[in-house]
Amino acid sequence: MLQGELQSPSFLPWVARHSRRLGLTCEILHADARKVVFKVDGQADLIDAFEVGCLLGPFDVWVETITRGPATSDD
Amino acid sequence: MTTAAVRNAWYPVGLLSGLSLDGKSSLLLGEEITVFGSRDGVPEVESGGRALPVVQRFGHLWTSLGYPGKDLFTIPEADHPDRTLVDVGVVRVKCSPLRAVENFLDIAHFPFVHTDILGAESHPEVRDYKVEIRDEVDEVWATKVEFYQPQAAKSAGGGITTEYMYRVPAPTCCVLYKTCPPRPGEWDVIALFVQPLTEDLCDVWPWMALFDEDSTLTELIHFQQLIFVQDRSILENQIPKRLPLDPAMETPTRADLTSVAYRRWLKRQSYTYGAQLVAE
Amino acid sequence: MAADTDARWVPIAVSADIPNGTVVPARLPTRMIAVWRAASGDLYANADRCPHRGMRLSHGFVRGQTLSCIYHGWRFGSDGACQKIPAHPAVEPPNTINCGPLPMTEANGVVWGAAVSPAVAPDQFTGHNALRSLVIAASVDAISSACKGRRVDGTIRAQLGGQNTILLMNDYGSGEVQVIALVPSGISAPNGMKVSTALEVLRRTAEGMGDAA
């Protein structure tokens, strides 16, 4: 789950492209201007790399925090 | 792209031991400056007819084109009387000043760029370490960084696992603290002070505060210069020339966390001199 | 004006300049590339940019059938796919992490590259072999003039060092042209040296003409 100033239109396609490059599957569960929740699947080290990439994101996006947890059935 | 954050920072512009009474011209953020030594011990820096603020610290002269909101950072460890202080001497590099800092923060390159000195191909793994932006001092810190090194320092006898800490106390400065073989429990200090001449050209002023009673000053300087010259061939051949603040064309991994924290910190304070805003 | 989708072969290097196990930089009209020869002798080309943090791959090293980046040792196969990330030895890199393989072919000592695979093979220039490559800071017209050559199908035919030479051109577009000189197959080494010397004279003359203009 990413939180911050995420309202740039470039953000979601940026995330999709980055997850594809890392060979991950990425499903967007929720997206608004302040919070985006993804379900990401793939090798643990590459999910780490995805998180590291998202910490920067496109220039007009500021990611404040990233919280990570195992996928739960009620989200 | 000189925002307030860029203009109001402190930058190194010379070695205190190398100043000239007649003045030496240089560049800072693309503007001409002249650096003067002084008979009464107070050096001056002038730009466009204006006297700039100056500070003498770590064997170097520092100045600013703007109005720094805070004092130049300190390195308390360096004040220990047994330390050998080493002015390495300036190296000019055709790269963005931000790339010079970021490379210094990177350890995954040790086995390949500093082969058999700072790293060995047999031990390339970078284990997890801790990175944070310490808001109370507004600095980037990486701690608990560990790496196996065949020859970690001039004072090391053979291969050891070295522990590192990295600190970015100013946008174009970085300080490395590493395990000190002759004095367990103490840290050797190696710093890089970068003077941005333009967005694509910088003067790098390395400086060290070490516990080493055996090596001569020349040997210490040569060791550090060798390492830096190996880095220079990387720095001058990275694409794009400026530091990307959007990693769309890159693939950072967990090992690159310090560099990503550095870029986040620059982005947060709108420090964009030498940076590439849109991925290309 | 060359476009990135230009599907045409460009002469970019001389085979003998790329021994087994080496990588060299080269240029297509719109991009810098890294050309490398695997241990097997097979030749490959990629964008000259590592997908990790942008270091030029032409500064890297070749081992077996792979090319590694000098910065962090990321290793790529002949299909451009990343095979190893040394800092994270347990990771199996996905082949989406890729340094962009490019079409490549070589014949009679000339190495040809393209941005997009052309439909037909390049001219083989049977009966000739590449002697050497050199970069001349002058226009193609100046070079042609300087050696009193004939323009034939995008090449220059000239008498140099007493031999009928064929000059292939790779115009960098920034005032420099890479010239790959072909000579008749089987000429002796001393005769090859004469052509080489004549090429140096050609370079000085063509560059001098630029200054006078």
Image (cartoon, coloured by chain):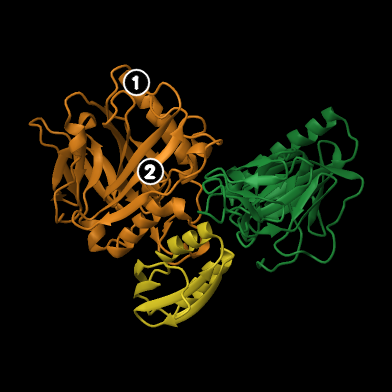
Tag shown at residue B218: 1
The correct choice, above or below, for B161 with respect to C92 in the image is above
Closer-to-camera residue (A30/C197): A30
Quarter of the image holding residue C64? top right
Q: CA distance from mark 2 to mark 1?
A: 29 Å
Subunit that carries the residue with mark 2: B
**Residue B16 visible here:** yes
Q: Which residue is mark 2?
A: B145
* Rendered image quadrant of residue B174: top left
Q: From the viewer's perspective, is residue C52 above or below residue A65?
A: above
Q: Colour of chain A?
A: yellow
The color chain C is rendered in = green
Q: Which chain is orange?
A: B
How many residues crowd around disc 1 within 10 Å: few (fewer than 14), some, or many (20 or more)? few
Residue B129 placement, left or right of C201: left
The amino acid sitting under disc 1 is: Thr
Q: Quadrant of residue B60?
A: top left
Query: Is A73 left or right of C101, judged from the image as shown?
Result: left
Image point 45% across, 50% down: which residue? B255
Work out whether residue C110 or residue C89 is closer to the camera in this orientation and state it.
C89
Q: Residue B26 at x, y = what percent?
A: 28, 43
Using residue B98 as the reference point, say whether residue C53 is left or right of it. Answer: right
Label 2 sits on a secondary structure element that is: strand
Marked residue nearer the N-terminal end (2 or 1) = 2
On screen, residue C49 above or below A73: above
Expressed as whole percent of the image width and height from the top left, the position of residue C45 reads 70, 52
Q: Nearer the viewer, residue A71 or B2?
A: A71
